[in-house]
Image (cartoon, grey):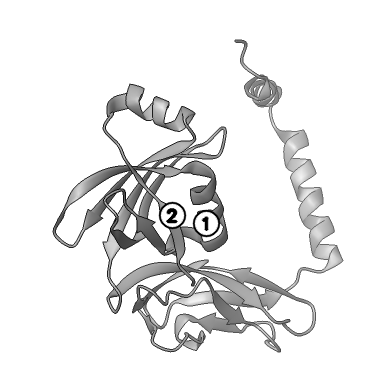
Amino acid sequence: MSEVRISAEPRTEFGKGGARRTRRAGKVPAVLYGHGEAPRHIALPARELAAAIRHGGMNQLFDIALSDGTSTLALPKAIQRDPIRDTFEHVDLLIVVRGERVTVEVPVVLVGHATGDTLVILEHDRLSVTADATRLPDRLEASVEGLGAGSHVTAAEIKLPDGADLATDPDLVVAVVSAAPSAEQIAEEIGEGREAAEEAPAGEQAGAEQVAEPAEV
């Protein structure tokens, strides 16, 4: 994964009021720490930060240009988001150095096509991997190509990039291939669901409808 260079400004205002003013200025409050250094409170440009993380995820490596003319490499350690606006509220950044090996969670994606009428279920969408901080994979591929019903893919069967080691239990089942339900089975399940709804007591049905109504504000 390539590095993203981003400029940081020192942050002197703290607390909720200072954080709000930082965000109104188009910045995200952040803390940079690690390797025995004292934590540095900084502010990062919101748009650049969001674009980089949405592209590279939590394993995006940043080359942070500090106001004193120095720079440091860092990885996102924790991100606080606004659940309504989907914006970043605060970011913790962990300092890393070239050649250092770190353990991170890497997303897993399914590739290939299973045989026949099958259903593929991704049991675990992330695996722990240890690799050079400057060469972290952006994703891992779990291949189900040619697999039939009853097959599965374990963590040990997923190919890792050079220099990366699996930090997860190798026997962990990542993906499962099962027989797809027939049309008759689907129809039967739908019918059973309708019968259960019709047999439910009137009071339970009324209660369910009441819960579904939006609260008044």
Instruction: Please report whichever mark, 1 or 2, sits nearer to the chain's N-terminal start.
Output: 2
Residue at figure coordinates x 62%, y 23% from the top left: 211
Depicted 29 relative to depicted 106: above or below: above
Q: Which one is in front in this view, the residue at disc 1 or the one at disc 2?
A: 2
Q: Residue 106: x percent and y percent?
A: 46, 69
Amino acid found under the numbered disc labelled 2: Ile
In this view of the protein, can residue 76 be seen by the observer?
no
Q: Is residue 215 left or right of residue 112?
A: left
Residue 209 x, y percent position in the rendering: 70, 23
Q: Is residue 212 visible?
A: yes
152 lies above or below 16: below
Task: Please state which of residues 212 and 70 is positioned toward the viewer in this rendering.
Answer: 70
- The label number, if any, that marks residue 147 in the structure image: none
Quadrant for residue 3, please give it: bottom left
Rendering coords of residue 206 (x, y %): 69, 21
Mark 1 neighbour density, 10 Å: few (under 14) some (14–19) many (20 or more) = some
Name the element at disc 2: strand
Q: Residues within 10 Å of mark 2 (few under 14, many from 20)?
A: some
User: What is the secondary structure assignment of the residue under circle 1?
Assistant: helix
User: Mark 2 — residue?
Assistant: 6
Residue placed at 34% from the left, 61% from the top?
74
* Image coords of residue 164 (percent x, y): 39, 83
Q: Nearer the viewer, residue 139 or 76?
A: 76
For residue 30, side relative to residue 5 (left or right) = left
- Left or right of 56? Residue 130 is left
Residue drawn at point x = 50 percent, y = 55 percent: 53
Q: Which residue is mark 1?
A: 52
